[in-house]
Image (spheres, helix red, strand yellow):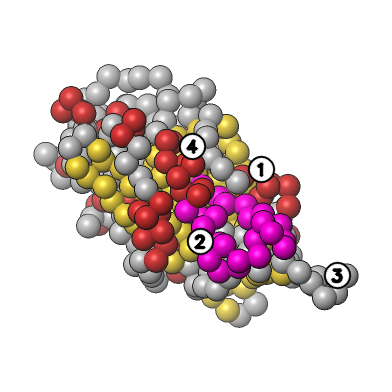
């Protein structure tokens, strides 16, 4: 699996984590289920933010909607309450409802009182449309697929044409799943900010690499109708307001590569910190939370920008060939970089 740095493409100046992945944030795990059969090229990607029962011990979270042409689930409550109480599933547009049901069943299996003796659960699912490279009307994603992605999540992140990224396109090339991270020193310890992207956006011909080159995918430019989901994780203590500000800077990483967030593009950033947990039920009237001094927040802003840019490049460089309905394909950026 080739990554951007294998081609000399480096985004920014900050040092990456040891794996240069979202899983450099301790406790974060990622799993995929990939579905490739006939006209179907789709799947599910699961991000498990922390081990244990997230409903009973929630994470501080935030959402930044850069352009809202999307059909995700659960983001409204995250924005309102500032907490995340389920893993995050990524899939195709018509798989959202199925994945919501899977997350609800998963949460009820851990906490049987949900919806009866306590509140309902806010399942978070984000999507991109893989229609050009997959028969989206096949409704191929099942609850079993979603649960398997959760159950098999681990510390190693496979990138490219896998999971939810199987049928995605980016700047006229084959897109998909990518990840990257940056290391940040906070009070004499190493913290991390990591990003995972589902890259399915950008007009053909608009891509600008960090070294200034503009690859030509030999594809006719179409109106911007794709999407990108950015999942941002950190172990730096932030409150919801700070976290949303950090999420907003992921947009700079997207723009650096040549995107302008067109009318038909759904561009969403969902962020969480593992440092501030919120109990579902508290015995006290107040909850103590810690937060970063804003004199240091520029480091997080730069990390979000650089990690997002490099994660997108990793998605492009790791992608493998996929043939969709009617023989539809996308060229590979890795081939262009190798001069093929």
Is there a contact, CB below 8 Å, between mark 2 and mark 3?
Answer: no
Q: Disc 2 designates what residue? A: 106
* Numbered-mark total: 4
Question: Sequence order check: which comes first, mark 2 or mark 4?
Answer: 2
Say few, some or many: other residues with alpha carbon within 10 Å of mark 2 (under 14 / 14 to 19 / 20 or more).
Answer: some
Q: Disc 3 designates what residue? A: 286
Say which of marks 1 and 2 sits in front.
2
Q: Residue at x 72, y 69 (%)?
A: 279
Quote the CA–CA distance across marks 1 and 2.
21 Å
Q: Which residues are magenta?
A: 102-125
Q: Disc 4 designates what residue? A: 255
Tag 1 secondary structure = helix
**Residue found farthest to the right:** 285
Tag 2 secondary structure = helix
Question: Sequence order check: which comes first, mark 2 or mark 3?
Answer: 2
Residue 165 highlighted magenta (yes or no)? no
Q: Residue at x 17, y 37 (%)?
A: 38
Quote the CA–CA distance across marks 2 and 4.
36 Å
């Amino acid at each position: 699996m080739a990554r951007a740095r294998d081609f000399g493409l480096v985004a920014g100046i900050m040092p990456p984590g040891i794996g240069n992945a979202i899983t450099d944030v301790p406790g974060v795990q990622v799993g995929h289920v990939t579905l490739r059969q006939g006209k179907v090229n789709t799947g599910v990607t699961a991000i498990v933010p922390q081990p244990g029962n997230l409903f009973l011990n929630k994470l501080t979270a935030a959402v930044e909607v850069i352009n809202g042409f999307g059909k995700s689930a659960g983001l409204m409550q995250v924005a309102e309450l500032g907490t995340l109480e389920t893993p995050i599933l990524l899939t195709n547009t018509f798989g959202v409802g199925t994945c919501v049901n899977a997350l609800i069943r998963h949460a009820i299996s851990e906490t049987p009182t949900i919806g009866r003796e306590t509140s309902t659960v806010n399942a978070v699912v984000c999507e991109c449309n893989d229609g050009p490279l997959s028969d989206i009307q096949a409704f191929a994603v099942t609850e079993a697929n979603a649960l398997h992605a959760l159950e098999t999540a681990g510390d190693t992140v496979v990138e490219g044409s896998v999971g939810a990224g199987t049928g995605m396109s980016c700047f006229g090339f084959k897109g998909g799943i990518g990840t990257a991270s940056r290391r940040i020193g906070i009070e004499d310890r190493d913290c991390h900010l990591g990003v995972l992207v589902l890259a399915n956006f950008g007009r053909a011909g608009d891509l600008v690499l960090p070294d200034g080159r503009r690859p030509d995918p030999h594809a006719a430019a179409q109106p911007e109708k794709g999407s990108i989901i950015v999942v941002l994780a950190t172990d730096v203590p932030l409150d919801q307001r700070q976290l949303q500000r950090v999420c907003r800077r992921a947009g700079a990483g997207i723009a650096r590569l040549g995107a302008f967030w067109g009318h038909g593009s759904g561009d969403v950033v969902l962020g969480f910190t593992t440092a501030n947990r919120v109990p579902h039920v508290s015995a006290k009237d107040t909850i103590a939370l810690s937060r970063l001094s804003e004199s240091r927040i520029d480091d997080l802003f730069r990390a979000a920008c650089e990690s997002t840019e490099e994660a997108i490049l990793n998605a492009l460089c790791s992608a493998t060939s996929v043939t969709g309905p009617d023989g539809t394909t996308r060229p590979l950026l890795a081939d262009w970089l190798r001069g093929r």
